[in-house]
Image (cartoon, rainbow, N blue to C red):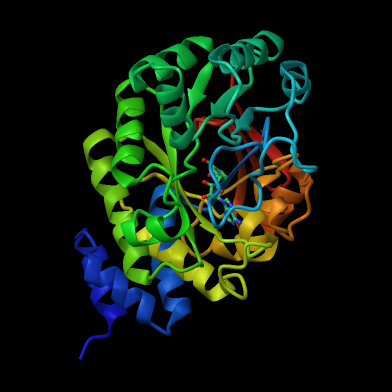
Amino acid sequence: MASILDRITGKLAAQERLTREDALELYRTNDLLRLGRLANQVKQRRWGNQAHFVLNRQINPSNVCVLSCKFCDFATKRGRPNAYEMTLEEVVSRCDADLREVHIVGGLHPDWPWSYYVEMLKAIKARVPQVQIKAFTAVEIDFFSKKFRLTVEEVLTQLKAAGLDALPGGGAEVFSERVRKALFPFKLGAPRWLEIHKIAHRLGIPTNSTLLYGHIETHEERVDHMLRLRALQDETGGFMSFIPLAYQVGKTRLVERQASALEDLKTIAIARLLLDNIPHIKAYWVTIGEETASVALNFGADDLDGTIGEERIMHAADAESPIRQTRDRLIQLIREARCVPVERDALYNVLQVFENGHRLVAAD
Ligand code: V47
């Protein structure tokens, strides 16, 4: 009898779409290397040997949040010793001219006015006009809409006019009502997260997508999550990338230990095979570590994210990756994976290709 991997090989050759059952069977396979090879073939067809990275910096303006999600070590309440709030000047001062992307996400702050967010984007664009701004998850957009009595369209239109280039993929967690009720009952659910991304796509704002895995979710819930993203992408085509985020145990300790490298690689490979309409699969080194991220470049991933600069959400949960990662280190990791480093911007425009130690292509 043909193995699942024989069957999937046939399906890929015939350009047939993978089903829910296919993906679940792939999670059950022990043949990790053959699964990785299949996913890598799909990656190669799209991107050849190239692997992307971006010079970026994360800015988390405040960890004060009205929510208390059970997986999150980052959020806190005002007045607690670890609470912090950045002024606009503090946010803007972190935007260096050599960056290509700033990635801004924060807690749902109970008191900040709408003008704080709009002025933040305007001030960043005034200081570093060439830096693209990827800011505010669907959770924040939903919060702004309710708090400031604006429609989602109005929120996004005003942010876009102020300088927003893209939305990050955070806040999706797992699209399972069971998991939502158990871990983040006061956070928006799947229909609203998907609706906000759909509106963003309609307004010409590209977005990313994520999955938080390695806690109490099942393989079925992971696969269903990916299939809902695939269905929306069929409608809009607005997702740039999918980023599986490995849950960091930290102090929330929903499980004893982080998902294994084997689970990380399987999830990345299955995502590449199932999400046939999402261009990029990101191996986010902050959560899975540099080594697994580098291996993942031969298991379906084509992107390592970026230099990050200063990341607080995962590091609040004790992520072990070093907090600063230089461009040279990313290039080295990509080369060790026998891939060609490609520097991109937030929207995946190619800026430079580093072939054989040399820069080959420079964008205008
Ligand atoms: O939504 C929170 C997750 C997300 C933990 O769009 C945790 O390019 C693991 O979405 N362990 C925010 N994950 C980060 C995010 C992201 C990261 C990198 C790139 C992009 C992109 C988006 O972080 C949250 C939540 O799902 N998160 N706590 C934790 N303990």
Res. 277 visible in picture:
no
Relative depth, front residue between 89 and 9: 89
Q: Residue 169 in the image: x percent, y percent? A: 47, 41
Residue 324 visible in rendering: yes
Q: Quadrant of the N terminus?
A: bottom left
Q: Position of residue 363 (x, y in %)?
A: 59, 24
Question: In the rendered image, which quarter is residue 196 located in?
Answer: top left
Question: Which residue is at 24% across, 63% downward?
Answer: 18
Position of residue 341 relative to residue 59, above or below, is below
Give whichever of 219, 129 is nearer the camera: 219
Q: Position of residue 171 (x, y in %)?
A: 47, 44
- Left or right side of 122 for 5: left
Q: Is residue 24 above or below residue 233?
A: below
Give the percent coordinates (x, y) of residue 309: 75, 39
- Tell me how many marks there are: 0
Q: Is residue 1 above or below residue 41?
A: below
Q: 39 or 135: nearer the eye?
A: 135
Q: Is residue 357 left or right of residue 279?
A: right
Image height of 214 relative to 119, above or below: below
- Residue in the image at 38% along x and 82% along y: 29
Name the residue at the bottom extreme: 1
Image quarter for residue 9?
bottom left
| Residue under the point 68% across and 33% down | 62
Q: Quadrant of the C terminus?
A: top right
